[in-house]
Amino acid sequence: MIQFKQNPDKAQDIEKIMNPLVKKWFFSRFKEFSLPQLYGIMEVHSRSNVLISAPTGATKTLTAFLSVINELVDSAEKGILEDRIYCIYISPLKALNYDIEVNLAGPLKEIEEIAGKGLGIRIGVRTGDTTASEKSKMLKKPPHILITTPESAAILLSTIKFKELLNNVSWCIIDEIHALADSKRGVHLSLSLERLQRHSDHICRIGLSATISPLEEIAKFLVGFEGENPRPCKIVNVQFIKKTDLKVLSPVPDLINTTHEEMQRSMYELIDKLIQDHKTTLIFTNTRAATERVVDHLKNKFPKNYTENIGAHHGSLSKTHRHTIEKSLREGKLKAVVSSTSLELGIDIGYIDLVILLGSPKSVARALQRCGRSGHKLHDISKGRIIVLDRDDLVECSVLLKSAVEEKIDRIHLPKNSLDVLSQQIYGIAISEKINIKDLFSLVKNSYSFSKLEYPDFREIIDFLAGKYISLEDRHVYAKIWHDEETGMIGRRGKLARVTYMTNIGTIPDETFVTVKCGEQTIGKIDEAFLERLKKNDVFVLGGSTYQFLYAKGMSAYVSSSVTRPPTIPSWVSESLPLSFDLAIEIGKLRQYLDDKFRQKLSEKEIISFINSYLYVDENGAQAIYNYFREQYLYAEIPTSKKLIIEEYIEENNKYYVFHSLYGRRVNDVLSRAVAFAVSRINKRDVEIGITDNGFFISCEKGLNIIKPFRILKSDKLDLVLNAAIEKTEVLKRRFRHCATRALMILRNYRGMKKRVGRQQVSSMILMNAVKRISPNFSILKEAKREVLEDLMDIESARKILKEIEDGKIQVKQITTRIPSPFALNLVMQGHLDMLKMEDKLEFLRRMHQMTLAKIGKEHKIK
Amino acid sequence: MKTQYFEKTDLGLLIKEKAENILVMADFHIGYEEALNKQGIFVPRMQFKDIIARLNRIFNHLEKKRIKLSKIIVNGDIKHEFGKISDQEWRETLKTLDLMASNCKEVVLIRGNHDKIIGPIAQKRSVSVAQHFIVGKTLIIHGNEIPEQQTLKKCSTIIIAHEHPAVSLRDSSRVEKYKCFLEGKYKAKNLIVIPSFCLLTEGTDILTEKLLSPFLSGSIRDFKVYVLPENPGASETEISSPYYFGKVSGLLCR
């Protein structure tokens, strides 16, 4: 049973179970138990699964480890400490692992000092960086506490010698579980935990999480299932014990009638002022590129304030650079540091007293996580300032702030039934032992991520791994596992199996960036998907300058810098953070309230006073929101959570349909593609779509009608439509490569050779065409589609919206404007282009040919 | 009456010279999938069957038109792998050559850059191997190197392969790639670039990618583009003519 723990344990009860040495040490360092400790220590002590959700700095890690240390010290004193692994600690970050090692070694040393003798408790770190000699040392003398990553854990489970050390482990601690649960890395981990459970069936699982929702699901993810029911788990929810001071700031009073230069100047002045008023400031941007830009601008604009005392920290920077920054932070040498996502997790960064978020963090949980990086100690106040740059941002962040203050956390999505990850893990299991297919299926089903897996899907993966999709004579090349149909036994196949597994494990796809070069000089990087859209002589923006595209070779794109024309291809971020669905709905509610107020003809003063009472904004902010909504109300109409407005206008020769569907980009991705697909189906024309968090637009030739196809779209047919709609998209091609790599159909490392991403992508296209011919439902292709529709997009919520439209709960209203309405403007400007390939390739060719003929004349009839 | 003319026949180029009918095809890259398998990319093998089907379609088409082939010239790279010839490659190459041989009087293999040691295969089926082939005033050569001046001097038309020419057509943001023939000039001589018979990929996009052949090192803006429809399903029996798309320059500025 999953249940919230309602009351903390009594301090004296906890003290009773503590070894005198540990107790003495604890109270020499701390005055009393913290709240998470009062809730958690007894649970860990009595081997009950527990999920502890608390903000950064709330002593979560010590809560988890105190009982473990207590028991180890106790056993050591009694001389019954065995040479085995008692506890495995898994965190998503290598950097965090080393922090933890240091943070455990210190207390153990201090306890030994109190004891006046060595206790012989060993801590070991095992990551991809661990040397061979360290590994063999670990085999001889296993650490009592093993610190590792999800990937290294999976490798250990498949390592014959090490596997034996994993029998009878008492505890498994999963740190930063919120950072794993929403990705395939988490899916992978959930299967590793089941594999671990097979060796140590009484293991106690402890999950540590920052603010996240829904906690019940995260708890189930942590503990898995035993047959039909989730294993028992207690949830300790102390998410809101830290005091927070959050504000939304606008650099200028008027966000619309300010020039770009003025806006930039004011923004940097504001940032500078905030930094100067505080000791150490952490600034979060939403992209890596912006991180560098902010550092540069601050240095240039305020050379006296910023020299060596500011730095950038993001995933593209070298490890050494990042370590230097982290060290300087801990030593208090930095005034400010700018990061994208890399400092979100709990790496020790010393004292931070202010967090600035540039632009919306797009989810309440992320906002709290980021702001929680300030005031690292439990009783400090987390201070966060969100700086907004346009009116949509202002509205969004104001609502976000309201949700944060009112403790409404947006729910994350946990991927289910990822067949590619399943393939990789079954391969890993087959390497390490012979197992019956029935036992394997129940092992897999015990994982939260596969608890709903159907047997046929599982069987398909077994057949895939056993190479049954290939005729018998060639099967030896493709089969990865051995499967005896008669006995149902599954096992290892091939001499290379183990090394192949070790060198290709993991779920994080290789990044696909293309280097942009001007002659021999490197300009920067663009997303591979962006390159696919460029044709010769297209002009695009990179790092603030414009370039003309010449040609691509391998993973390099060659450009010329002498260009005066404006960009022909909009700069386009392929996979930036999407707005959470729950937050989107909250913004829709605000729109609803404000629409009502305007319709009731309330005065400006009354409406502003409502905004002030409903949201947590300053005078400027309230006025700006009022103005924005007023313009929309007077010029067109305010779309709300209950009223979907479709705005139609004509520009040059194209008709634009703007759908004011404020449901976040993951939902709009689904809705827009569905509509575009229906249009193409009926009219045999491709249409252009642009998608943002606040809605989407479809642009097409003047004669086309979009409303009708939208009307015939039905929620129960959505899966069918979308499966067809994404069939030929670039995004499916890329996701197929990722899935094929995870399922080990494409090996990144093979026979000592490492493949470049470009090579992988070309080969994966050939692979995709081939498996499609074997079956349009080939398991790995099916998984790529599932990933696109469920993980990247949000087909489930989209279906819900369509259903509400069908049931009349959401009204659809069509309006016509001459130029885009205020709400539509940003949407049209920001929407990224994607293309729906509906026409058959041959038809497309014929139509293009007609166009060409019209231009060049019918000079040639082919001979 | 013209003594010699060319007819684009699916992925091949038919040369009619006096009483002779010569079919030029190139860049089959047999064994490509096996090479990918060896690199750890487990692509199921389908190309060989597809090549045989596509060749049969071409031969059926010629038969219907009562065209008897005197020669088939494989203008380089019948197989993919550099160096060692694998069992599968050996078998499939022989079968392909057998099919060709049963549809003409003589098969000639032009050496390509992937064909360094094609000798044994050629011997096995008594086909001849050459650096290039000249028929009338036409030079047929793979195209990875420029031949000696003496060879060039003798001819007015050059047929090369090697480049795997393909073209990407776009309409707003949609892009599709098709195999194509290119026709232009190389130093006042006519130059025809034939598409690859490798059915796994379309080839090099002549509009965006850097070209490989030294024959194409100058500007190709004035080259004419003949686009081939995508490989239709096996059920298709008819072969279709290529679509003329004007000059490269026209496609570039669209």
Image (tube, rainbow, N blue to C red):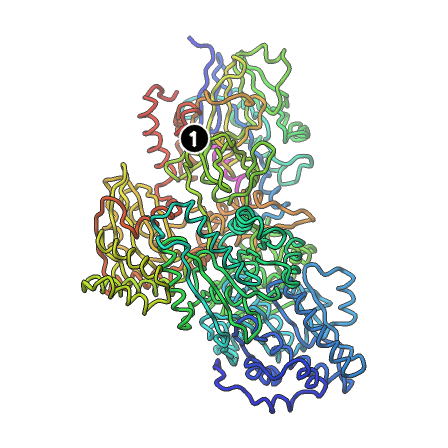
The residue segment tinted magenta is B45-57
For the residue pair A682 and A184, the one nearer the viewer reads as: A184
**Above or below B72: residue A427:** below
Residue A170 sits in which quadrant? bottom right
Residue A834 visible in the snapshot: no
Q: Position of residue A677 (x, y in %)?
A: 33, 48
Quick check: B124 left or right of A512? Answer: right
Task: Please identify the quadrant where the C terminus of chain A is shown.
Answer: top left
Magenta residues, dominant SS class: helix
For the residue pair A232 and B25, the one nearer the viewer reads as: A232
Q: Which residue is mark 1?
A: B228
For the residue pair B45 and A403, the one nearer the viewer reads as: A403
Residue A628 visible in the snapshot: yes
**Above or below A365: residue B61:** above
* Subunit that carries the residue with mark 1: B
Quick check: A233 left or right of A489? Answer: left
Determine the residue positioned at 76% across, 64% down: A134
Q: Label 1 amino acid?
A: Leu
